[in-house]
Image: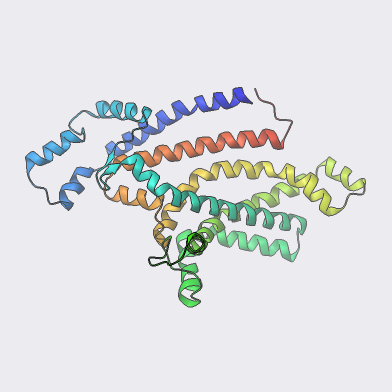
Amino acid sequence: MKKMLVRRLLQLIPLLLAVVVMNFALIQAAPGSFLDVMTAEQQVTDPAMIERLRETYGMDQPAYVQLGRYIWSVARLDFGFSYRQNAPVSEVIMAHLPATALLMVAAIGVAVLLGMLAGVLAAVKVNTAWDTMVSMLAVFCFAAPSFWLGIMLIVLFSVKLGWLPVGGMQSVLLDGGLWAQVLDIAKHLVLPTLALGLFYAATYARVMRASMLEVFRLDFVRTARAKGLGQMRVVLAHVLRNALLPIVTLLGLQLGTLLGGSVVIEAVFSWPGIGSLLFDSVMSRNFPVVLGVMVLSAVIVALANIAVDMVYIRLDPRIRIK
C-alpha cells in the first residue's frame, strides 16, 4: 500500500508538468493579454509605461522563456502575481478556496446520498412504480441545465416562498455569534448545493441501480437467499458493498468536473468561490490566476483518483497491488 501511494504521488509530477505546459500553450494562443485589459481599465496610454509593465510581468521575453520561468516558479509553489487583486495568486486562490470547498463537499454529499438511496430503491423495487418514478426524476435532473435548475429554485424558494436567500454566502448585516453565522451560511448553501448536487445525483442513481441489478444475479446472492437471510440483510451485507465499486469510480472522475460545474452555479448564486474567480480571471485575461486554478484542479483530480484506488482495495479484497 505504501509503495503504491508513493508511486502514485510521484506520477503527479509529470501530470502537473503536462497541465502547466498545455494550459500555458492555450493561453499563449488566445487573443489579447491582461495588459490590454489593465491599460484599458486604468486608461494607460503612455507607450513607455506599457513597455515598463510588459517588462515587469516578463511579457517581453520569448514564450519558451516565460514557460520555463513559470515551471520553476510552480516548483517553488509560486504561482505568480494577480494584477486584478494586487496580490499573489496563491493568496487569491486560498481566499476563495474555502467557499468552493464547502460547496463541493455539500454538493457531492447530497449527490452521493440521494443518488445511492434512489438507486437502491429502484433496484429493490425494480419494474414497479417506485422504479419508474426514480428513473423519471433521474432523467429530468440529468437533462435539466444546472443554471436553469438554480434559477427555478431561486424563483420558488426565494421569490415565491421567501424561505431561503437569493444568493451570496452570508447576510450583509448579521447580528449574533458563531452559531448564528453557521446557520446563516447553511441557509445560503442550500440552494446552490441542490442545484449542483441534483445533476450528479441523477447519474449516481442510474449507475447504482444498474450495478445492484447486476449483483443481484450473481451466485453468492442466490446462496445468501437460500440460507434464509432476509431481504434487508442480503441488500446491505452482500449486494450494496459489491455494487459500490462503480460509484467509487464515478465519484473519483466527477470530483474534477465538479469544480468546472461550480463556475455556473457560483455565477447564478453569487457564491464567492473558485468558480467566480476563474470566470472573472478569464474575462479580465488574468492568466496567472487561470493557470493557478488549473493546476489546483489537476491536483484535486489526481488525489481523488489515488483515494479511489485505496478505497477500491478496501472494498474488494480480490484487487491486489502490483
Question: Is residue 247 in view from this perspective?
Answer: yes
Describe residue 106's horizontal placement relative to residue 28 as left or right.
right
Q: Where does residue 42 sit, x and y in percent of width and height?
A: 15, 51
Colouring of the image = rainbow
In-front residue for pair 305/218: 305
In-front residue for pair 54/77: 77
Q: Where does residue 299 sit, x and y in percent of width and height?
A: 47, 36
In-front residue for pair 39/137: 39
From what the image shows, is residue 1 above or below residue 272?
above
From what the image shows, is residue 146 above or below residue 221?
below
* Residue drawn at x 36%, y 48% as measured from the top left: 278
From what the image shows, is residue 296 above or below residue 321?
below
* Residue drawn at x 10%, y 41% as measured from the top left: 49
Q: Where does residue 48 sit, x and y in percent of width and height?
A: 7, 39
Question: Is residue 32 in view from this perspective?
Answer: no
Q: Where does residue 251 sit, x and y in percent of width and height?
A: 58, 44
* Residue drawn at x 56%, y 58% as measured from the top left: 198
Describe residue 263's horizontal placement relative to residue 116 as left or right.
left
Count the labels in the image: 0
Q: In the figure, residue 217 lies in which quadrant? A: top right
Describe residue 284's horizontal placement relative to residue 312 as left or right.
left
Q: In the figure, residue 147 lies in which quadrant? A: bottom left
